[in-house]
Image (cartoon, coloured by chain):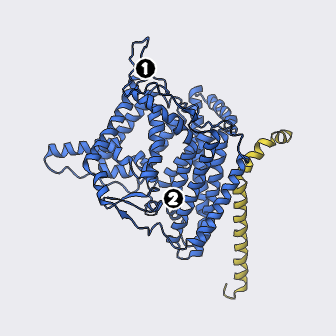
Amino acid sequence: MTEVLPVAHGIVGRSDLPIPEWLFGWAAAVVLVVSFVALAVLWPEPRLSRATFKPLPRLSRVLLGRPLDLLCGLLGVALLGVTVYAGFDGSQTATANFAPTFVYVIFWLGLVGLSVLFGNVYRAFNPWRALGRAVSWVSRTAARGPLPAPLSYPERFGHWPAAVSIFLFAVLELAASDGDTPQTIAIAALVYSLIQFVGMALYGVEEWTERGDGFSVYFGLFARISPWGVRDGVVGLRLPLAGLADFRPLAGTVPLLAVTIGSVTFDGAAEAPIWTGIAPDISDFLQTLGLSPEKALEATFLIGLVAAISVVYGFYMLGVRGARSVGGGFTASELSRAFVASLVPIAFAYVAAHYFTLLLYQGQAILSLSTNPFGFLASNPLGEVGTDIFGTADRSIDYGVIGATSAWYWMVGFVVLGHVAALTAAHDKALTIYSDVKLAVRSQYWMLAVMVGFTSLALWLLSQANQ
Amino acid sequence: MFLLLAHAGHWLVNAAYFAPVAGFLGWLGWVEIRGRRERREERRGSPTG
């Protein structure tokens, strides 16, 4: 129920579209079917898994070198520190304080786009990894020798810690009544930090970061879409989506992506009449069970969030079971993991389309918020002092940066592009696991149905913002 | 029933978004049924089936 951005999903006045919005959905479905046919005819062998990797050693020495690593880590830690400090000591008005906009817009949304474009940039800025490595270095130096080996990360944990982390973040963002309160965000950041430190202490900094750190896993998945990658410690270029081909799913990977797509689904559906109609009834019922009105509303939104995640998961598994029915001897579990990487471009499509205007509009606010992170005015009857560190305190949001109609076309573009990319990734994967090309293509009929379903759902959700 | 018709504009537009999915799933279902029918007939026709 984060109210950080009144225009978060708001595109008003799309009345000058040439065709009804629902017809965009039909057009998108046609594009997917045509893409499917094109893939079946023109893509008879796996390409992504065999894509060449072009190492760039000179650039790699700079990008992966110790100086830049230290600098980025310091910046990440500094931003975490400012977020926590401003959250506790700053104005508790969400739109005036640095913390909500930085966390929910710049960090949560901006890094998705940066990861898709430039690869795993978050790894360098990850404050918890930076702090963990610093503590590890200090410990080794103080011990004057090797430290005890960390515990072996249990295979059965897989990506479950990451999936739970991202789910809890979604709960904070979408169900908690005070999820956008700066102090709540500061407390959540500290709790998350504690969990990361325990995880890194038990299983090692890199091992925990790769598997257990929710944000690291989350942004790392999107980074696999990027043409930029790292192989054997060297930065290089590859085909877009090739990073998905060599992704090894773990236990919890499917739930993680279901949470990602499902949370965006619920965020959009929460504005739809279908939800606004039944939510008060659910809340009233929960109040009869003894919950306070506030807690009943939070529980209602939690139920909606879990329902949306379940629908996404269920729909994906329906496609998996359908793919299994064509033969090949695979179990549903094997197929669900085999094709899970194709959900990553869908997740990107959902995030990009749904939060495009939020990033464009509220993202501009970071200029004024970063110069006055505590959010106090220069003259304040309580005596708190405002700042203007970068001289940008007077910068306001330019809502004319993009028109409503243009924004709609961008959002549709993200949806279509993301789902075509997902179809491509799934098709390429099918060619690697099925011995017969025809069987591979037949299995993709069901994945195509899943993609068309997610496309239709995405466009319907976007249209609900205009209800 | 009258209420359903009175609000038909709303749910019809919403349903229109998902018409391609419904159509596709219907087609998949028909392909599956046809495939099973063909496999059944093959088994009947085969002396060892």
Total numbered badges shown on the rendered structure: 2
Chain letter belonging to callout 1: A
Amino acid bearing label 2:
Val
- Vertical placement of A51 versus A349: above or below? below
Chain-order first, disc 2 or disc 1: 2
For the N terminus of chain A, give its image quadrant: top right
Image-quadrant location for residue A78: top left
Residues beneath discs 2 and 1 located on the same chain? yes
Compared across the picture, whether A280 is left or right of A220 comes to right
Q: Which mark is residue A340?
A: 2
Q: Where residue B40 sits: x, y (%)?
A: 71, 78
Image point 39% across, 65% down: which residue?
A53
Q: CA distance from mark 2 to mark 1?
A: 46 Å
Q: Which mark is residue A376?
A: 1
Residue closest to the far left: A144
State the yellow chain: B
- Vertical placement of A383 versus A140: above or below? above
- Vertical placement of A67 versus A446: above or below? above
Report helix, strand or loop for mark 1.
loop
Image-quadrant location for residue A307: top right
- Tint of chain A: blue
On the question of residue A168 being in view, the answer is: no
Of A264 and A391, which appears nearest the observer? A391
Q: Where residue A337 sits: x, y (%)?
A: 49, 61
Image point 44% across, 31% down: which residue?
A367
